[in-house]
Structure formats: structure tokens, C-alpha cells
Amino acid sequence: MIDYPQRLHLAKLPTPITRLQEISVATGVDIRLKHDELTGTEVTGNKIRKLEFSLAEARAQKCDTVITCGGVQSNHCRATAILGQRNGFKVHLLLRGERPQTPSGNLLLDYLSGATISYMPQSEWKFHEKEVRRLQEDYALNGQKAYYIPVGASDEVGLWGYIAAAEELRRDFEALDWEPDYIVMATGSGGTQGGLTLGTRLLEMASKVVAFNVCDDAQWFANKIRQDVTLWQQRYKQEIDVDELHITTVEGYVGPGYGEAGPEVFDTIKRVASTDGVFLDPVYTGKAFHGMVTELGKGESGALPGAKRVLFIHTGGLFGLFPQQDHFSFP
Ligand SMILES: *Cc1c(COP(=O)(O)O)cnc(C)c1O
């Protein structure tokens, strides 16, 4: 029914859905988890679904190099470094911040995969796309062709990843004879939320997509998703009323800032690991999960009114836990 563009099959799909027993009992809501942290081992997480389309596009454009950007602990950059390397691309990462003394977490994997890594201070980051164009020109002078994947692979090409995931979810729900009132996830660059919002709409699924932002605010995500969907329509000749998309972003759980979490997030990570054996991360899934449980606790006045069944998308991020290990009190 949905007509997809070219795609590389890189992720281990479909990912399973399991019930979170302890948390379901504690909240009185049937909470299940879509295990997108199982899309691969080193390539764990949500970015691989988008990169299936982004890297296929890079190959179609006969590019030999891929450039992408993100934070020093970017899960997206790590997935791109590894998948690029495996699929015959040279990978160049432009990371926001200072080069650390020793690489840890995601950055260690970036380094091991052989990616070229350059750093740009936070204060200059607003010019990062200019720097990407400069790098592309440098590669061109060298006879190479570099494809640019923006932060998080959140653009009109990467959007297909979670449109396809919505179709996978529809099959999951049929097989389980179970349909959630809400599909909940963390949102950071908007592509996962955007793809699911659009995909559930195209497939006329009843579940509402609700995202918890880990940076920026609800207005930023509404603008970003409308912009990506508009470009997607133009590029792939689709017809959809962009203003009618239900983009729902719940604010209030960013905490001290992007990549920085308060003690409630570390408590949530410890709690879910020690009750249901599921490991969340402090940058994305831990914040969103904490937000979801808090909002469920508010009942009808919360952001998830009438919730009886909820699906939480585990978007990965395990490697981002290790550089923050000092935040856990270890007796
Ligand atoms: C990138 C990321 C997200 C957010 O996804 P976006 O599509 O960028 O909004 C959520 N969780 C994890 C673990 C991520 O790496």
C-alpha cells in the first residue's frame, strides 16, 4: 500500500514487543515495550531504521563518503560510522564540543570503526552546516563525493524509517490482537516522532503518538516535523494535509539540559533495570520513560488521559549510559 523508495536492509526486523510486568502492575496500565534497542548490537537503536533509507539514497547518488553531525555521545553518529563502514562508505563525523582526552561510550565505537572525526565548539555550532559544505567541497577536490545526512538522519529521506516502523507496528498489533491507546517515545531531532505521526496517519491507525522532548520545546518539534513532511511530500509526490497532522509533544522533562539528567532519571533507569530487566539511557529513553510514568500517575489530568494500553518505543542509547556512570550511587 505504501510505496517506499530504495532501501538497504540493515536492521534486525521486526523487533519484538514485550510486556513490562512490574511497571504495568505499579501504574495499573498495560505497558509494553517495542524493542528497537534490538535492531542490532553495535548499531542498536532507532537511527538504523532511518539510515536504511539515507544510505540507500547516498548509494543511489553514487557517493563514496558520508558526512554527518551530532553531539560527542551521539547514537546517530555511532550508528552511521559503523553502518557506513560496513557498506563501503568513508564516514566523516562532525561532532559538537571538545575532543575528550579518552574516548568512551559511543565515541569509542566511532573511533574503532575508523571514521574521520572533527570537532566544532558549541559556540560555533550554529554554523555547522556551513562547515559541512566546506568539507563536501574538500572531498570533491579530492575526487570524492560526500553525501550529507543531517543530525539524527531527521529529514525527508530518513522520515521513511519510522513510516515503515508504523507499518511494522500495525502488523505487530494484529498478531498480538492488542492495540495501544498511545505510542510513546523520546524525541530529539524529530524524525522518529515525525515518521510515526505520519505513518500512523497514512495507515489510519487508532493509536495516538505522544513524544517527550529531551531538548528544545513543543513548538520546535511541530515546526520541524511539518517542515520535514512538507519536503517529503514534494520529493516523493505525496498528498497529505500537513496542518492536519496531530503532532503531540509533552514538555517538562528535559531536566537540566540536553544530555544532562536529574536524579529522577537515574532512579528511573535503576528501577526499570532492577524490576523488568530493561536498560534505559540518561539522554533519551530514561527521560521519556520517567515522563510517561509521571503523566500516567496524573490520570485524566495528565498528558495520557484514558490510557489503558501504552506502547513505549525503546529507541536504544545504551552506550550513552557508560560515560554517565558516576551519577549512580554505588554502595
Ligand atoms: C536519537 C535518539 C532518540 C530521538 O530520536 P529522533 O528521531 O532524533 O527524535 C531517542 N532515543 C535514542 C536512544 C536516540 O539515540
Image (spheres, rainbow, N blue to C red):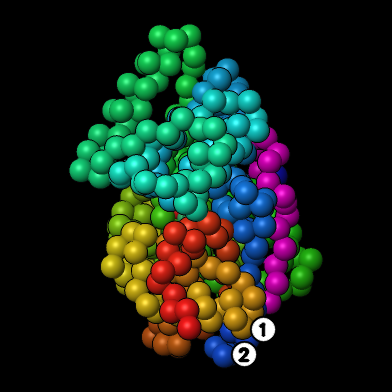
* Vertical side of 70 occupied by 173: above or below: below
Please indicate, yes or no, whether residue 90 appears anywhere in the rendered image. yes
- Give the side of residue 40 with respect to residue 258, left or right: right
Residue 3 x %, y %: 66, 38
Secondary structure predominantly adopted by residues drawn in magenta:
loop
Look at label 2 and name its amino acid.
Val
Look at label 1 and name its amino acid.
Gln
Q: Which residue is mark 1?
A: 21
Please indicate, yes or no, whether residue 196 appears anywhere in the rendered image. no
Residue depicted at 40% across the width and 9% down the height: 141
Residue depicted at 48% across the width and 9% down the height: 143
Between the residue at mark 1 and the residue at mark 2, the CA separation in whole angstroms equals 6 Å
Residue depicted at 72% across the width and 51% down the height: 13
Residue 149 x %, y %: 46, 34
Q: Are marks 1 and 2 in contact (CB under 8 Å)?
A: yes
Q: Which residues are magenta?
A: 2-19
Residue nearest the observer in this picture, 218 or 17: 17
* Vertical side of 174 occupied by 164: above or below: above
Q: How many marks?
A: 2
* Vertical side of 121 occupied by 171: above or below: below
Element under label 1? helix
Name which quarter of the figure residue 218 lies in. bottom left
**Which mark identifies residue 25?**
2
Residue nearest the observer in this picture, 283 or 210: 283
Q: Few, some or many C-alpha atoms within 10 Å of disc 1 (few <14, some 14-19, many ≥20)?
A: some
**Quadrant location of the N terminus?**
top right
